[in-house]
Amino acid sequence: MSEDPLVSVVIPAYGRPEYLPEAVRSVVEQTYDLVEILVVDDCSPDPIEPTLTEFSEDPAVDLTVVRHPVNRGANAARNTGIEESTGEFVAFLDDDDYWRPEKVERFVDAFERGGPDVGVVYGGIDVVDGGGETVRSVRPSRRGDVTKALLRGENVVGGFSNPIVRRSVVEAAGPTDTRFPSWQDREWYLRLSTHCEFEYVDEQLTVRRMASHGQISDDFERKRDVSFPLFVHKHRSTAAEYGMERRFVAERSRAVAAAAIRTGNFRSAYPFLLRSLFYYPLDWKTYAFLALALAGPSTLERVRRIRRRVGV
């Protein structure tokens, strides 16, 4: 890159005005200057513009607010942001997350070092509680061709607030798929991975609020009825190309079972765990989930208490 590229930051917003200004401020305060901010209001109940006055009235801040006339979901808002943005690189930031000031600068440097084959840069994530205290830190570990890792179910990148993506790779892979009620990020990363290499910055530069993200990710019925069949249908051929078809189906089956267990639907987990074992009987995680499903809610709660105590 001969000169500093423009980075477009898309913030889908809906009904969380108490967090949105902090998200925007974390972008405004980046040490990297060439940033445009697009807040896409997904038809929030109350107008969001009053919460952004301090930024919209600042001539030094490149801020655009786009409002959907009807609520279309966060993925549609992200895609609107892609369409309206102009940067060489595109990033998403959920309206209740925020970035540390050096993030964009560090990521752009990583693109520079990695060269044109690198299409996605991501980094470490700190998960904080309602009081802002870090309860868990996730460090990056995969670079290069990450497709097999994603097919195995590894959560390589984390949520949408983490990566910055080269626009040419977004155009090659396509935007986020609005049909998915869950696993939208994993599905998008899998498509991106078939077009580029991934690189990471080993710093905790993205902050995710724990309390704001749990409900959708644990929606068992939508995973069972929509996300699971759609994900498998859409990517089974890719898994077969990598010699991982059976393991891919097994992993997604186990993911549905895990959602069932987390939401107390223990009996509903059994068929998905059995399917997972049929397709790939060598994964110890499936046996662990089967033990949890058989043990019931009291054991699950004990496991949760232990995880909270040790911060995992």
Image: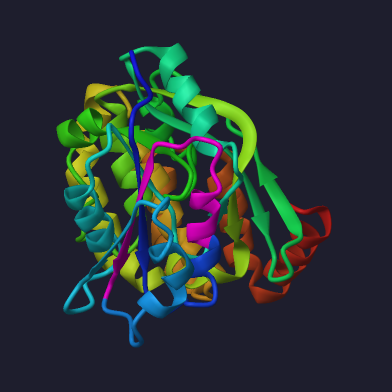
Q: Position of residue 85 (x, y in %)?
A: 23, 47
Looking at the image, can residue 245 be seen?
no
Q: Is residue 35 magenta?
A: yes
Q: Is residue 221 visible?
A: yes
Residue 213 belongs to magenta span? no
Question: Does residue 307 lie above or below 276 as drawn?
Answer: below
Nearer to me, 87 or 178: 87
- Give the position of the N terminus as an image quadrant: top left
Residue at (34% x, 28% y) in the render: 5
Where 32 sits versus 299, above or below? above
- The residue positioned 38% from the left and 24% from the top of the image is 4
Residue range corresponding to the magenta coloring? 23-42
Q: Position of residue 222 (x, y in %)?
A: 32, 70
Locate residue 180 relative to residue 97 in the image: left or right: left
Residue 198, quarter of picture: top left
Tell whether 233 sits left or right of 286: left
Question: What is the quadrant of residue 166 in the picture?
Answer: top left
The image position of residue 105, as x and y in percent, is 52, 31
Residue, far bottom: 45
Residue 99: x, y in percent? 56, 49
Q: Quadrant of residue 309?
A: bottom right
Q: Residue pushed farthest front?
A: 59
Query: Colour scheme in the image?
Result: rainbow
What residue is drawn where x is 72% and y is 63%?
132
